[in-house]
Amino acid sequence: MELAFVTSNTGKVEEARKYFEPLGVRVYRLPVAYPEIQADTLEEVALFGVEWLAKKIKGPFFLDDSGLFVEALSGFPGVYSAYVYRTLGIEGLLKLMEGVENRKAHFRSVIAYWDGEAHLFTGRVDGEITNAPMGTEGFGFDPIFKPEGFDRTFAQMTTAEKNTISHRGRALRAFADWLKENLK
Ligand code: ITT
């Protein structure tokens, strides 16, 4: 089986490939741009995205909308994570957190699969923002996110290890379980 992943982010593709490879599913990237609306939740952004893309793409596909939610910043950057990553970057986020004691944060990922209708799968991982970047693996905010129960950041883990605990890994698991049940 093959699955089309609509994203500009090759890091996300790598994680989905690693996840699905042992299940005999090949993931390939469809580089189609779509509007990311301003909304309060990742679910709304993802749903608008698949419904918009469904008018342009033939056949099933999925996308992933994700974000980093920092407790001390009232959930910022959250749905604005891509914009904040592009503009402030990791260093900018660390600056915002200077002197902040509560480092708690979580990542959420919403996968939206379109097969004539939309199906949403979500995952979350809790952790904290480090004081400085650590590691070179992964992408995005990985070097400053340390998942609960680990003394390493996501950027200090392999893709396979990150997948076992990450927001995206969990959403991918829910998606894969659903596919197993529904593609019999
Ligand atoms: P798309 O084309 O798939 O939208 P994107 O990178 O713009 O790619 P999002 O709109 O979902 O992705 O924005 C999420 C941002 O949050 C993204 O820029 C990353 O910097 C960050 N992010 C999401 N998942 C992450 C992860 O697993 N590790 C580190 N940073 C992550």
Image (spheres, grey):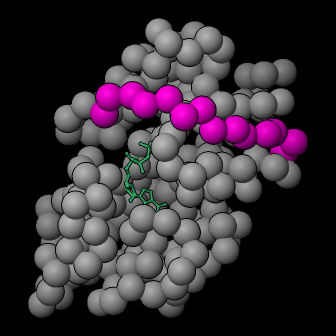
Residue 25 figure quarter: top right
Q: Residue at x 66, y 67 (%)?
A: 159
177 falls in the magenta region:
no
Q: Pick the residue in front: 57 or 159.
A: 57
Q: Residue at x 27, y 39 (%)?
A: 41
Whether residue 122 is visible, yes or no, is: no
Q: How many badges with numbers are in the image?
A: 0
Where the C terminus falls, by quadrant?
Answer: top right
Residue 137 figure quarter: bottom right
Where the N terminus falls, by quadrant?
Answer: top right
Residue 173, how many percent across, how many down?
Answer: 65, 47
Q: Is residue 39 above or below residue 16?
A: above
For the record, the magenta segment spans 23-36
Q: Is residue 33 above or below residue 67?
A: above
Residue 5, how many percent across, how many down?
Answer: 60, 35
Residue 138, how many percent across, how many down?
Answer: 55, 69
Residue 8 located left or right of residue 48? right
Residue 39, how many percent across, how many down?
Answer: 21, 34
Residue 121 located left or right of residue 160? left
Q: Pick the residue in front: 43 or 21.
A: 21
Residue 49 located left or right of residue 137? left
Q: Is residue 108 above or below residue 31?
A: below
Whether residue 119 is visible, yes or no, is: yes
Q: Residue at x 40, y 49 (%)?
A: 66
